[in-house]
């Protein structure tokens, strides 16, 4: 896929998962073959005001490239200002969030609420494109609800405003993450625009990635929840799409090794106090489906050090050997 001057060879990208896709996780997924990564969404208003947390969300390292910064807001002027500030962190592209269904984001006029106002959404894209020296992409949903499926209209307006690519999550805002995924709307968007289209929704492995691409004609897929506790999913998808090879799931020992490496990096970047607190959800995802894991969840929720997590990992390896 060509994105401005950027050539992206792989077919599966990491979604900008709020509270999940931080530096440690993005680097890990890139190491497993993610086509590109996208930072957690940052508030345009916060960026414009010099908010410290927003600056942390925009930070990108060389090992996770190609990588984009994602911003959200409802003012063309503020979004343009935020884009200029985001450029200071040298992103490979800037992504505009028009799909987040979280009440806190939508109630502020950003995220999925922009799908209710295509004209404003297009003005925002135009303003950010004019302010940016890197490609600008847009992530949207199929629509607000079942009576307002307007991704095709919005995608065309975004393309006309200068967007370099569109990611479509095949669910409405009201639907949140409930099934089913509307693959037909992704197909319609792909047919309606000339720029690349990335399909998003329920891709969890190679076969589901291939199915979405075949059904919609999309240029790539984006993985969100399918990567939680499973960063190796990108290597599995790449192997299937390129060679029709089904790579097996890692062994329990391998999974625990990846988990500990992830959490150690998380603590290195954020400090152990913050890192361990955030590690609890990741550890629960990594241990999902393992024999006896349910009995360890209470302990995982109370861990205060990497050593405690390492002990749980060793016990799980022994119980599953």
Image (cartoon, grey):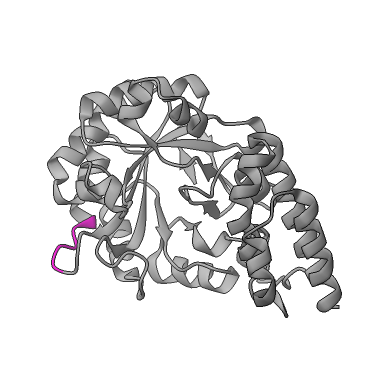
Q: Is residue 190 magenta?
A: no
Q: Quadrant of residue 36?
A: top right
Q: Look at the picture and state if 210 lies above or below 156.
A: below
Q: Main secondary structure of the magenta part?
A: loop
| Residue 92 visible from this viewpoint | no
User: What residue is rendered at 53% in x and 50% in y?
Assistant: 20
**Which residue is more in the foreground, 3 or 17?**
17
Q: Look at the picture and state if 203 lies above or below 294.
A: above
- Image position of 198 (left or right of 145): right
Q: Look at the picture and state if 145 lies above or below 193.
A: below
Q: Which residues are magenta?
A: 147-151
What x and y, as percent, mark residue 24? 64, 43
User: What residue is rendered at 22% in x and 39% in y?
Assistant: 160
User: What residue is rendered at 86% in x and 78% in y?
Assistant: 321
Counting labels gives 0
What x and y, as percent, mark residue 318? 86, 74
| Residue 249 visible from this viewpoint | yes
What x and y, as percent, mark residue 158? 25, 42
What x and y, as percent, mark residue 144? 20, 59
**Which residue is more in the foreground, 226 or 151?**
226
**Which residue is more in the foreground, 198 or 29?**
29
Q: Quadrant of residue 66?
A: top right
User: What residue is rendered at 60% in x and 39% in y?
Assistant: 23
- Image position of 28 (left or right of 310): left
């Amino acid at each position: 896929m060509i994105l401005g001057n950027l050539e992206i060879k792989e077919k599966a990208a990491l979604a900008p998962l709020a509270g999940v896709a931080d530096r440690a996780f993005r680097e890990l997924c890139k190491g497993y073959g993610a086509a590109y990564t996208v930072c957690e969404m940052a508030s345009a208003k916060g960026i414009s005001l010099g908010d410290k947390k927003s600056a942390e969300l925009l930070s990108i390292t060389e090992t996770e490239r190609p990588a984009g910064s994602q911003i959200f807001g409802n003012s063309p002027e503020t979004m343009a200002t935020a884009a200029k500030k985001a450029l200071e962190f040298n992103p490979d592209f800037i992504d505009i969030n028009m799909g987040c269904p979280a009440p806190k984001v939508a109630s502020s006029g950003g995220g999925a609420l922009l799908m209710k106002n295509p004209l404003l959404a297009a003005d925002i894209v135009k303003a950010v494109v004019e302010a940016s020296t890197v490609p600008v992409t847009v992530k949207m949903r199929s629509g607000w609800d079942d009576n307002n499926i307007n991704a095709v209209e919005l995608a065309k307006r975004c393309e006309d405003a200068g967007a370099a690519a569109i990611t479509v999550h095949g669910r409405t805002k009201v639907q949140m993450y409930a099934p089913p995924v509307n693959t037909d709307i992704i197909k319609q968007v792909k047919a309606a625009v000339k720029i690349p289209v990335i399909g998003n929704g329920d891709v969890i492995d190679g076969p589901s990635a291939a199915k979405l691409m075949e059904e919609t004609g999309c240029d790539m897929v984006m993985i969100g929840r399918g990567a939680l506790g499973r960063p190796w999913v990108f290597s599995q998808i790449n192997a299937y799409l390129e060679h029709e090879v089904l790579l097996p799931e890692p062994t329990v020992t391998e999974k625990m090794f990846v988990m500990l490496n992830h959490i150690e990096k998380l603590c290195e970047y954020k400090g152990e106090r913050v890192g361990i607190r955030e590690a609890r959800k990741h550890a629960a995802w990594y241990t999902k489906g393992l024999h006896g894991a349910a009995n360890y969840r209470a302990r995982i929720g109370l861990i205060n050090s990497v050593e405690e997590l390492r002990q749980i990992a060793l016990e799980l390896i022994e119980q599953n050997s």
